[in-house]
Amino acid sequence: MDEHTYELDELKAISYARVSTGSQAASGLSTDAQHRAVERAAAAQGWQIVERITDGAVSGTTPTQQRPLLQAALEQLRDGHVQVLAVARSDRLARSTIELLRLYERSQAEGWTLAVLDFPAGLSGPEGRMCIGFRALVAEFESDMARVRTSEALEIARQRGTRFGRPSRHSDTAKKLASRLRSAGHSLAQIAAALTDAGIATPTGSTAWSRSSARSLLRTIDHDTAAQAHQQAFTRSDNDGDPPKRHAA
């Protein structure tokens, strides 16, 4: 993107790749593809890749200042030991418009090349800033929309009674007895004593129930009851528009 006094075959480059999850980092498939894309560009441009940097299990929203490997690369670029920071896609560097623009402006100020392979080559100055800003806005928008869609899907699942987190380990026997005792007006201490006398195990395997463990059991019962009610409500609303079933004569 920027003009340098170096000859093409003298340009040294760092290839940077990033993945968001630990499983992606462990497989290496995504990062290898990113580095191979950079290597193809390097062969075409005459760059010499002197280092491959991979940030594994790092979110694109993580500020660049909190990525030690990337910071070490930026120091080499600043000091002139390396002249190119190459990355396959802009969202591998950052999903924040501000973060990308900061990196671009830093490259312009310090005289090194920020080579983002999904950007048009040769852009610098105001045109380069505009292009990076536009692409970063699109990436940021897509990331925000993905979060919105995930949030909406989770809310619908909650309304339908889907339980998130660790599954309940309370037994059905404990739930039935506790429900019956609460309906009869017994206190937490009385419910805990009855569960203990009945020899019913707590989720941890103990047969000694306390007020707090009885309270946790009742909360689980309330959650299950609410989830069942939500599920029934959704089932009724889903069936409201169905045509009446025909019965055989």
Image (cartoon, rainbow, N blue to C red):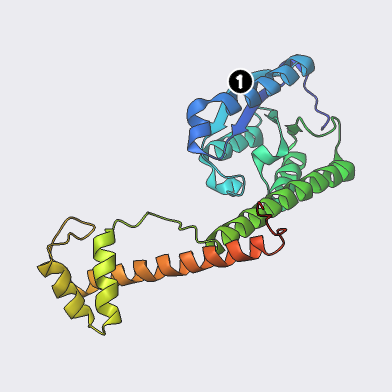
184 sits to left or right of 103: left
Q: How dense is the environment of label 1, judged by Cα within 10 Å: few (below 14), some, or many (20 and up)? A: few
Q: What is the x, y in percent for residue 26?
A: 47, 29
Give the residue type at disc 1.
Val
How many numbered marks appear?
1
Give the residue displayed 77% in from the left and 40% down from the top.
Answer: 108
Give the residue displayed 86% in from the left and 47% down from the top.
Answer: 130
Pick the residue in front: 117 or 206.
206
42 sits to left or right of 22: right
Q: What is the x, y in percent for residue 87?
A: 68, 31
116 sits to left or right of 202: right
Q: Quadrant of the N terminus?
A: top right
Per the image, label 1 sits on a secondary structure element best described as strand
Give the residue displayed 24% in from the left and 69% down from the top.
Answer: 177
Instruction: Identify the residue at the far bottom of this view.
Output: 185
- 10, above or below 215, in the image: above
Q: What is the x, y in percent for residue 112?
A: 73, 33
- 215, above or below 111, in the image: below
Does the image show residue 81? no
Q: Quadrant of residue 223?
A: bottom left
Q: What is the x, y in percent for residue 188?
A: 23, 79
158 sits to left or right of 184: right
Pick the residue in front: 134 or 9.
134
Does the image show residue 157? yes
Give the residue displayed 24% in from the left and 77% down from the top.
Answer: 181
- 106, above or below 211, in the image: above
Residue beneath disc 1: 50
Pick the residue in front: 204 or 227.
227
Q: Quadrant of residue 42?
A: top right
